[in-house]
Image (tube, helix red, strand yellow):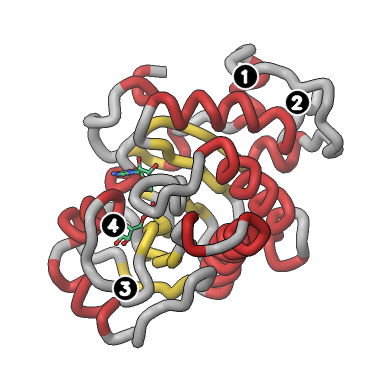
Amino acid sequence: MAARRNVSRGVLNISDIPSLLEEYARHNLPRDPSSVHAPSAALNRKVSVLRYDITKVAADAIVNAANNRLAGGSGVNGAIQSAAGPQLLEESLKLHGCQTGDAKVTKGYMLPAKLVIHAAGPIYDQYDKKEANRLLESCYLRSLQVAAENGVKTIAFPSISTGIFGFPITEASPIALNSVRQFLQSAEGMTLERVVFVLFAGEDEKVYRKTIPKYFPPSE
Ligand code: AR6
């Protein structure tokens, strides 16, 4: 699919992004015989991975890799702030910050997404490994909870903490995938229809594509 290779394309609707179910049918994903998770067509229909600019994804909500003050920043935060316009920062500064591992919501303003869920990820070097993993998992789970509470049916995630905050993508991607699987299987997650992992770098997309079959194995 051309969109996977070109991160500078236009607005992308969730319905135009192939699900894992479709990707398996097209043999676009590898298989992982070591997976311990039950294959599920229902889950694979809800999840997608692609390389794109998340500010151009027209989901009900996109997640921002934010900081504790919910202030401006660089990376995906800077891209979201500049595409949304100054009102997003005005609103987020009124939320009294966000603890590491938590998430808070604002409107999307000029973004094609209706809402932005700001998740404050852990700085990798500031915690022991177990705590860093727990806080990253909490970012994904809290973002999904906030999404469900706000009636979100479609959501796109960037790779939280793996840029400036230094979390290795090989350690972060299993946590992201496992948290999403866990939430989609819970009672709270029933209303979510689509979850898209949006990677900005080709190398990050490769890691995700390699890791996905362990957490979302093919259903046939
Ligand atoms: N679309 C999707 N992903 C993107 C985009 C984009 N437009 N731009 C960058 N990424 P980072 P962090 C990817 O550094 O590590 C900020 O200053 C990028 O390739 O944005 O959680 C905040 O204010 C990487 O894989 O977030 C915080 O202070 C991923 O987004 C701090 O950085 C996350 O990288 C947060 O650091």
| Amino acid type of the residue tagged 3 in the rendering | Leu
Out of 35 and 161, give the one closest to the viewer: 161
Mark 2 in CB contact with mark 1 (< 8 angstroms): yes
Separation of disc 4 and disc 3 at Cα?
9 Å
Packing grade of label 3 (10 A; few <14, some 14-19, many >=20) is many
Mark 4 in CB contact with mark 3 (< 8 angstroms): no
Task: State the residue position of label 2.
Answer: 218
Mark 3 in CB contact with mark 2 (< 8 angstroms): no
Task: State the residue position of label 1.
Answer: 29
**Label 1 SS:** loop
Task: State the residue position of label 3.
Answer: 70
Mark 2 and ligand 1: say if the CB distance to the nearest ligand atom is below 8 Å: no
Which quadrant holds the C terminus? top right
Task: State the residue position of label 4.
Answer: 77
Q: Disc 1 vs disc 3: which is toward the camera?
A: 3
Give the image location of residue 115, x and y in percent.
37, 65
